[in-house]
Amino acid sequence: MEVRVYEYNSGEFITRLITYAAINLKFKIHAFEPSGFSFDFPLGEFGANEFIRDRFVLIDDFIGIIEDKKRNTDANNNMMSITGIDIKGLLQRRIIIPHTFSGIQGTAGFDVVTGYTDACIKQFWRSNIGINAEPNRRFEFITIGGNKNIGINNDKYMARFNRLSDVTAELAKGANLAITSMPMIEAGTILLDVAEPVMRTAAQSDVSPIILSLDRQTVLQIEYIQEADSYRNAFYATRSGAQFADEALTMLFLRGNEPEPSGLLRREVHLNVSVNTPVAGQEYIEMKRQAVHNFINYEETDALNAKINFTHLKYKRDYDVGDFITVQNKDWGVEADIKITAVEIAYNSTARTETVILGTGEKGYVKRLLTEIKNI
Protein backbone atom coordinates (compact mmCIF):
# COMPACT_ATOMS: atom_id res chain seq x y z
CA MET A 1 0.00 0.00 0.00
CA GLU A 2 1.33 3.45 -0.92
CA VAL A 3 2.06 5.86 1.93
CA ARG A 4 3.06 9.46 1.29
CA VAL A 5 4.71 11.78 3.80
CA TYR A 6 4.40 15.56 3.49
CA GLU A 7 5.80 18.55 5.29
CA TYR A 8 3.70 21.72 5.33
CA ASN A 9 5.63 24.94 4.82
CA SER A 10 4.68 28.42 3.58
CA GLY A 11 1.31 27.42 2.14
CA GLU A 12 2.28 24.20 0.40
CA PHE A 13 2.65 20.48 1.09
CA ILE A 14 6.17 19.34 0.25
CA THR A 15 6.62 15.65 -0.57
CA ARG A 16 9.19 14.00 1.69
CA LEU A 17 8.59 10.32 0.99
CA ILE A 18 6.59 7.94 -1.18
CA THR A 19 6.91 4.37 0.04
CA TYR A 20 5.35 0.92 -0.22
CA ALA A 21 7.31 -0.52 2.71
CA ALA A 22 4.76 0.16 5.48
CA ILE A 23 3.14 -2.98 6.95
CA ASN A 24 0.28 -3.70 9.38
CA LEU A 25 -1.36 -0.49 8.23
CA LYS A 26 -4.64 0.56 9.80
CA PHE A 27 -6.69 3.76 9.89
CA LYS A 28 -10.10 4.70 11.24
CA ILE A 29 -12.61 7.34 10.17
CA HIS A 30 -15.26 8.36 12.71
CA ALA A 31 -18.37 10.35 11.87
CA PHE A 32 -17.71 13.08 14.43
CA GLU A 33 -14.97 12.07 16.89
CA PRO A 34 -11.19 12.17 16.45
CA SER A 35 -9.56 8.96 15.24
CA GLY A 36 -6.20 7.97 13.82
CA PHE A 37 -3.83 5.58 12.07
CA SER A 38 -0.95 3.21 12.74
CA PHE A 39 1.60 1.14 10.82
CA ASP A 40 5.03 -0.45 11.13
CA PHE A 41 8.07 0.47 9.06
CA PRO A 42 11.51 -1.21 8.76
CA LEU A 43 14.22 0.92 10.36
CA GLY A 44 16.67 -0.06 7.65
CA GLU A 45 14.32 0.90 4.81
CA PHE A 46 14.93 4.02 2.73
CA GLY A 47 12.99 6.99 4.15
CA ALA A 48 12.72 5.74 7.73
CA ASN A 49 14.05 9.07 8.99
CA GLU A 50 11.24 10.99 7.25
CA PHE A 51 8.59 10.01 9.81
CA ILE A 52 8.78 13.11 11.98
CA ARG A 53 6.18 14.37 14.44
CA ASP A 54 3.59 16.75 12.94
CA ARG A 55 4.34 15.73 9.37
CA PHE A 56 1.37 14.61 7.28
CA VAL A 57 0.68 11.07 6.10
CA LEU A 58 -1.59 10.35 3.13
CA ILE A 59 -3.08 6.85 2.73
CA ASP A 60 -5.68 6.55 -0.03
CA ASP A 61 -7.68 9.75 0.62
CA PHE A 62 -7.15 9.57 4.39
CA ILE A 63 -4.81 12.24 5.72
CA GLY A 64 -3.37 12.25 9.22
CA ILE A 65 -0.63 13.81 11.32
CA ILE A 66 2.23 11.83 12.85
CA GLU A 67 2.28 12.00 16.64
CA ASP A 68 4.39 9.14 17.97
CA LYS A 69 6.92 6.56 16.87
CA LYS A 70 8.39 3.64 18.74
CA ARG A 71 11.48 1.63 17.80
CA ASN A 72 11.37 -2.13 18.31
CA THR A 73 14.66 -3.99 17.90
CA ASP A 74 15.38 -7.63 18.64
CA ALA A 75 17.18 -10.54 17.03
CA ASN A 76 14.52 -10.96 14.36
CA ASN A 77 13.09 -7.48 13.84
CA ASN A 78 14.33 -3.95 13.38
CA MET A 79 11.12 -1.98 13.08
CA MET A 80 9.44 1.19 14.22
CA SER A 81 5.76 1.77 14.87
CA ILE A 82 4.17 5.00 13.66
CA THR A 83 0.89 6.32 15.09
CA GLY A 84 -1.01 9.53 14.55
CA ILE A 85 -4.31 11.38 14.44
CA ASP A 86 -6.71 12.46 11.73
CA ILE A 87 -7.66 16.09 11.07
CA LYS A 88 -10.44 15.99 13.67
CA GLY A 89 -7.73 15.03 16.14
CA LEU A 90 -6.19 18.49 15.69
CA LEU A 91 -9.33 19.96 17.27
CA GLN A 92 -8.17 18.35 20.52
CA ARG A 93 -5.23 20.78 20.52
CA ARG A 94 -7.45 23.84 20.86
CA ILE A 95 -9.89 25.04 23.48
CA ILE A 96 -12.69 27.48 22.78
CA ILE A 97 -11.47 30.93 23.78
CA PRO A 98 -14.37 33.39 24.20
CA HIS A 99 -14.10 36.26 21.72
CA THR A 100 -14.14 38.75 24.60
CA PHE A 101 -10.78 37.39 25.78
CA SER A 102 -7.76 38.98 24.13
CA GLY A 103 -4.04 38.69 24.59
CA ILE A 104 -2.70 36.38 27.27
CA GLN A 105 -4.69 37.53 30.30
CA GLY A 106 -7.96 39.15 31.24
CA THR A 107 -11.57 38.27 31.95
CA ALA A 108 -13.67 36.13 29.63
CA GLY A 109 -17.36 35.36 29.44
CA PHE A 110 -19.03 32.71 27.32
CA ASP A 111 -18.87 32.29 23.57
CA VAL A 112 -22.47 31.78 22.45
CA VAL A 113 -23.44 30.49 19.01
CA THR A 114 -26.95 30.06 17.63
CA GLY A 115 -28.46 29.00 14.31
CA TYR A 116 -28.20 25.88 12.17
CA THR A 117 -25.92 23.26 13.71
CA ASP A 118 -23.32 23.34 10.95
CA ALA A 119 -23.08 27.14 11.23
CA CYS A 120 -22.60 26.83 15.00
CA ILE A 121 -19.80 24.30 14.55
CA LYS A 122 -18.06 26.37 11.90
CA GLN A 123 -18.32 29.55 13.94
CA PHE A 124 -16.38 27.82 16.72
CA TRP A 125 -13.87 26.57 14.13
CA ARG A 126 -13.36 29.99 12.57
CA SER A 127 -12.91 31.60 15.97
CA ASN A 128 -10.37 29.06 17.25
CA ILE A 129 -8.46 27.58 14.30
CA GLY A 130 -9.55 29.73 11.37
CA ILE A 131 -9.56 33.26 10.08
CA ASN A 132 -11.03 34.82 13.24
CA ALA A 133 -8.54 33.16 15.57
CA GLU A 134 -5.38 34.82 16.80
CA PRO A 135 -2.55 34.12 14.30
CA ASN A 136 -0.69 31.74 16.64
CA ARG A 137 -3.84 29.64 17.12
CA ARG A 138 -4.67 29.14 13.44
CA PHE A 139 -4.09 26.05 11.35
CA GLU A 140 -3.12 27.75 8.10
CA PHE A 141 -3.45 24.54 6.08
CA ILE A 142 -7.13 24.06 6.96
CA THR A 143 -9.92 25.57 4.85
CA ILE A 144 -13.32 25.63 6.55
CA GLY A 145 -16.30 24.94 4.30
CA GLY A 146 -19.10 27.45 3.92
CA ASN A 147 -22.33 27.27 5.90
CA LYS A 148 -24.87 24.85 4.41
CA ASN A 149 -27.75 25.45 6.87
CA ILE A 150 -28.05 21.80 7.87
CA GLY A 151 -28.80 20.11 11.17
CA ILE A 152 -31.07 21.65 13.81
CA ASN A 153 -32.26 25.04 12.60
CA ASN A 154 -32.32 26.69 16.04
CA ASP A 155 -29.35 25.01 17.69
CA LYS A 156 -27.46 26.81 20.45
CA TYR A 157 -24.27 26.24 22.40
CA MET A 158 -22.41 28.18 25.07
CA ALA A 159 -18.72 27.44 25.54
CA ARG A 160 -15.96 28.74 27.74
CA PHE A 161 -12.56 27.01 27.50
CA ASN A 162 -14.18 23.73 26.37
CA ARG A 163 -12.08 21.49 24.16
CA LEU A 164 -12.97 22.25 20.55
CA SER A 165 -13.13 18.58 19.57
CA ASP A 166 -15.63 17.84 22.35
CA VAL A 167 -18.00 20.65 21.38
CA THR A 168 -17.73 19.71 17.70
CA ALA A 169 -18.64 16.09 18.46
CA GLU A 170 -21.54 17.03 20.75
CA LEU A 171 -23.11 19.36 18.22
CA ALA A 172 -22.59 17.01 15.26
CA LYS A 173 -23.88 13.92 17.04
CA GLY A 174 -26.89 15.76 18.46
CA ALA A 175 -27.93 16.87 14.98
CA ASN A 176 -27.02 13.64 13.16
CA LEU A 177 -24.25 15.26 11.12
CA ALA A 178 -20.77 14.06 10.13
CA ILE A 179 -17.45 15.90 10.19
CA THR A 180 -15.46 15.40 7.00
CA SER A 181 -11.96 16.26 5.78
CA MET A 182 -10.67 16.26 2.23
CA PRO A 183 -6.97 16.62 1.39
CA MET A 184 -6.27 18.97 -1.52
CA ILE A 185 -2.52 18.58 -1.62
CA GLU A 186 -1.84 20.48 -4.84
CA ALA A 187 -3.84 23.44 -3.55
CA GLY A 188 -1.92 23.38 -0.27
CA THR A 189 -4.97 22.91 1.92
CA ILE A 190 -7.26 20.43 3.68
CA LEU A 191 -11.00 21.08 3.56
CA LEU A 192 -12.76 20.64 6.91
CA ASP A 193 -16.52 20.49 6.56
CA VAL A 194 -19.84 19.23 7.90
CA ALA A 195 -22.10 16.85 5.97
CA GLU A 196 -25.59 15.40 6.22
CA PRO A 197 -26.03 11.62 6.30
CA VAL A 198 -27.11 9.79 3.16
CA MET A 199 -30.08 7.49 3.58
CA ARG A 200 -29.03 4.21 1.93
CA THR A 201 -31.67 2.08 3.63
CA ALA A 202 -33.74 -0.61 1.96
CA ALA A 203 -36.95 1.43 2.29
CA GLN A 204 -35.80 4.31 0.05
CA SER A 205 -35.21 4.45 -3.71
CA ASP A 206 -33.27 7.71 -4.21
CA VAL A 207 -29.88 5.95 -4.10
CA SER A 208 -28.74 2.35 -4.26
CA PRO A 209 -29.56 0.77 -0.88
CA ILE A 210 -26.91 -0.85 1.27
CA ILE A 211 -28.12 -4.02 2.98
CA LEU A 212 -25.66 -5.79 5.27
CA SER A 213 -26.51 -9.46 5.53
CA LEU A 214 -24.60 -12.72 5.80
CA ASP A 215 -27.16 -14.24 3.44
CA ARG A 216 -26.47 -11.58 0.82
CA GLN A 217 -22.71 -12.07 1.38
CA THR A 218 -22.24 -8.31 1.83
CA VAL A 219 -20.67 -8.92 5.24
CA LEU A 220 -18.32 -11.64 6.43
CA GLN A 221 -18.96 -11.25 10.16
CA ILE A 222 -21.25 -9.32 12.52
CA GLU A 223 -20.35 -8.64 16.15
CA TYR A 224 -22.69 -7.20 18.77
CA ILE A 225 -21.33 -5.07 21.64
CA GLN A 226 -23.31 -3.82 24.64
CA GLU A 227 -21.71 -1.88 27.49
CA ALA A 228 -23.29 0.28 30.17
CA ASP A 229 -20.28 1.43 32.20
CA SER A 230 -20.66 5.08 31.24
CA TYR A 231 -24.46 5.18 30.97
CA ARG A 232 -26.29 7.75 33.14
CA ASN A 233 -29.98 8.64 33.27
CA ALA A 234 -30.32 11.17 36.12
CA PHE A 235 -28.45 14.43 35.55
CA TYR A 236 -27.97 16.95 38.36
CA ALA A 237 -26.93 20.12 36.54
CA THR A 238 -25.45 23.12 38.34
CA ARG A 239 -25.24 26.52 36.74
CA SER A 240 -21.63 27.66 36.52
CA GLY A 241 -20.45 31.08 37.61
CA ALA A 242 -21.93 31.49 41.08
CA GLN A 243 -19.66 33.27 43.56
CA PHE A 244 -20.31 30.63 46.21
CA ALA A 245 -20.85 26.95 45.43
CA ASP A 246 -23.79 26.58 47.81
CA GLU A 247 -25.60 29.44 46.06
CA ALA A 248 -25.41 27.89 42.58
CA LEU A 249 -28.70 26.82 41.00
CA THR A 250 -28.94 23.03 40.58
CA MET A 251 -31.69 21.17 38.72
CA LEU A 252 -32.45 17.53 37.94
CA PHE A 253 -32.94 16.51 34.31
CA LEU A 254 -33.99 13.16 32.86
CA ARG A 255 -33.76 11.66 29.40
CA GLY A 256 -36.63 12.60 27.11
CA ASN A 257 -40.05 11.74 28.51
CA GLU A 258 -38.81 8.75 30.47
CA PRO A 259 -40.14 8.30 34.03
CA GLU A 260 -37.72 9.07 36.82
CA PRO A 261 -35.57 5.94 37.31
CA SER A 262 -35.19 4.34 40.71
CA GLY A 263 -33.30 1.58 42.49
CA LEU A 264 -30.78 -0.34 40.41
CA LEU A 265 -31.97 1.36 37.24
CA ARG A 266 -30.93 4.84 38.46
CA ARG A 267 -27.46 6.04 37.40
CA GLU A 268 -26.62 9.59 38.46
CA VAL A 269 -24.04 12.15 37.38
CA HIS A 270 -23.35 15.81 38.13
CA LEU A 271 -22.85 18.38 35.35
CA ASN A 272 -21.66 21.97 35.35
CA VAL A 273 -23.53 23.92 32.67
CA SER A 274 -22.99 27.39 31.32
CA VAL A 275 -26.02 29.67 31.16
CA ASN A 276 -25.44 33.26 30.21
CA THR A 277 -27.91 35.31 32.32
CA PRO A 278 -31.15 33.73 31.08
CA VAL A 279 -34.41 35.66 31.05
CA ALA A 280 -36.19 35.41 34.39
CA GLY A 281 -38.36 32.31 34.39
CA GLN A 282 -36.38 30.71 31.55
CA GLU A 283 -33.60 29.27 33.72
CA TYR A 284 -34.92 25.70 33.46
CA ILE A 285 -35.20 25.83 29.66
CA GLU A 286 -31.73 27.29 29.16
CA MET A 287 -30.07 24.95 31.64
CA LYS A 288 -31.78 21.93 30.07
CA ARG A 289 -30.65 23.00 26.60
CA GLN A 290 -27.04 22.91 27.78
CA ALA A 291 -27.45 19.74 29.86
CA VAL A 292 -28.94 17.80 26.94
CA HIS A 293 -25.77 18.38 24.93
CA ASN A 294 -23.93 16.43 27.65
CA PHE A 295 -26.33 13.46 27.59
CA ILE A 296 -24.54 11.95 24.58
CA ASN A 297 -21.39 11.53 26.69
CA TYR A 298 -23.27 9.12 28.96
CA GLU A 299 -24.98 6.80 26.48
CA GLU A 300 -25.02 3.03 26.57
CA THR A 301 -22.76 1.41 24.01
CA ASP A 302 -25.11 -0.57 21.84
CA ALA A 303 -23.23 -1.23 18.64
CA LEU A 304 -22.75 -3.70 15.85
CA ASN A 305 -19.40 -4.19 14.15
CA ALA A 306 -19.62 -5.65 10.66
CA LYS A 307 -16.70 -6.81 8.55
CA ILE A 308 -17.56 -5.81 4.99
CA ASN A 309 -17.19 -8.22 2.06
CA PHE A 310 -14.80 -6.14 -0.02
CA THR A 311 -15.83 -7.81 -3.28
CA HIS A 312 -19.38 -6.46 -2.89
CA LEU A 313 -19.06 -3.11 -1.10
CA LYS A 314 -16.30 -0.53 -0.83
CA TYR A 315 -15.82 2.49 1.43
CA LYS A 316 -16.35 5.84 -0.36
CA ARG A 317 -17.59 4.10 -3.50
CA ASP A 318 -20.71 2.53 -1.99
CA TYR A 319 -20.98 3.98 1.53
CA ASP A 320 -19.49 6.55 3.90
CA VAL A 321 -19.41 7.30 7.61
CA GLY A 322 -22.64 8.90 8.81
CA ASP A 323 -24.79 7.08 6.23
CA PHE A 324 -27.86 5.10 7.29
CA ILE A 325 -28.01 1.56 5.98
CA THR A 326 -30.09 -1.57 6.57
CA VAL A 327 -28.90 -4.62 8.53
CA GLN A 328 -30.65 -7.97 8.14
CA ASN A 329 -30.21 -11.23 10.00
CA LYS A 330 -32.59 -14.03 9.10
CA ASP A 331 -31.46 -16.19 12.03
CA TRP A 332 -32.48 -13.41 14.42
CA GLY A 333 -35.53 -12.61 12.30
CA VAL A 334 -34.86 -8.88 12.38
CA GLU A 335 -34.16 -5.94 10.12
CA ALA A 336 -33.15 -2.44 11.21
CA ASP A 337 -31.89 0.82 9.75
CA ILE A 338 -28.65 1.83 11.46
CA LYS A 339 -26.11 4.64 11.19
CA ILE A 340 -22.49 3.98 10.21
CA THR A 341 -20.63 5.61 13.09
CA ALA A 342 -17.10 4.73 11.97
CA VAL A 343 -15.10 2.77 9.41
CA GLU A 344 -11.80 1.01 10.09
CA ILE A 345 -9.60 0.00 7.17
CA ALA A 346 -6.64 -2.35 7.56
CA TYR A 347 -4.01 -3.69 5.18
CA ASN A 348 -1.88 -6.76 5.75
CA SER A 349 0.41 -8.69 3.45
CA THR A 350 -2.42 -10.41 1.63
CA ALA A 351 -5.61 -8.36 1.87
CA ARG A 352 -7.51 -5.21 2.71
CA THR A 353 -10.37 -5.35 5.23
CA GLU A 354 -13.12 -2.83 5.94
CA THR A 355 -14.98 -2.93 9.25
CA VAL A 356 -17.95 -0.65 9.92
CA ILE A 357 -19.09 0.29 13.41
CA LEU A 358 -22.87 0.62 13.40
CA GLY A 359 -25.06 2.52 15.81
CA THR A 360 -24.58 5.12 18.52
CA GLY A 361 -26.81 3.85 21.31
CA GLU A 362 -29.63 6.19 20.31
CA LYS A 363 -33.16 4.84 20.38
CA GLY A 364 -34.49 3.76 17.02
CA TYR A 365 -31.12 2.53 15.71
CA VAL A 366 -29.34 -0.38 17.32
CA LYS A 367 -31.60 -0.56 20.38
CA ARG A 368 -34.57 -1.48 18.22
CA LEU A 369 -32.60 -4.34 16.71
CA LEU A 370 -31.21 -5.49 20.05
CA THR A 371 -34.61 -5.43 21.73
CA GLU A 372 -35.96 -7.75 19.06
CA ILE A 373 -32.94 -10.03 19.44
CA LYS A 374 -33.48 -10.31 23.19
CA ASN A 375 -37.11 -11.24 22.64
CA ILE A 376 -36.37 -14.14 20.30
Image (cartoon, rainbow, N blue to C red):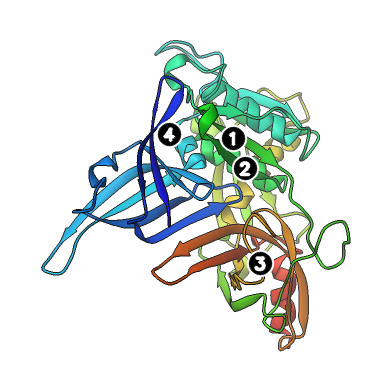
State the residue in front, 4 or 276.
Answer: 4
Mark 4 or 2, closer to the camera: 2
Q: Residue at x 58, y 27 (%)?
A: 143
Horizontal and vertical percent position of residue 157: 66, 32
Looking at the rendered structure, the secondary structure element under dot 3 is loop
Image quarter (top left, top right, bottom left or bottom right) of the N terminus = bottom left
Q: Residue at x 59, y 64 (%)?
A: 357
Q: What crowding class fits label 4: few (fewer than 14 Cα within 10 Å), some (14-19), or many (20 or more)?
A: few
State the residue in front, 101 or 259.
Answer: 101
Mark 1 touching mark 2, by CB under 8 A?
yes
Q: Which mark is residue 179?
A: 2
State the residue in front, 158 or 310.
Answer: 310
Tag 4: residue type?
Answer: Arg
Looking at the rendered structure, the secondary structure element under dot 4 is helix
Residue linked to disc 3: 313
Disc 3 or 4, which lies upstream in sequence? 4
Residue linked to disc 1: 192
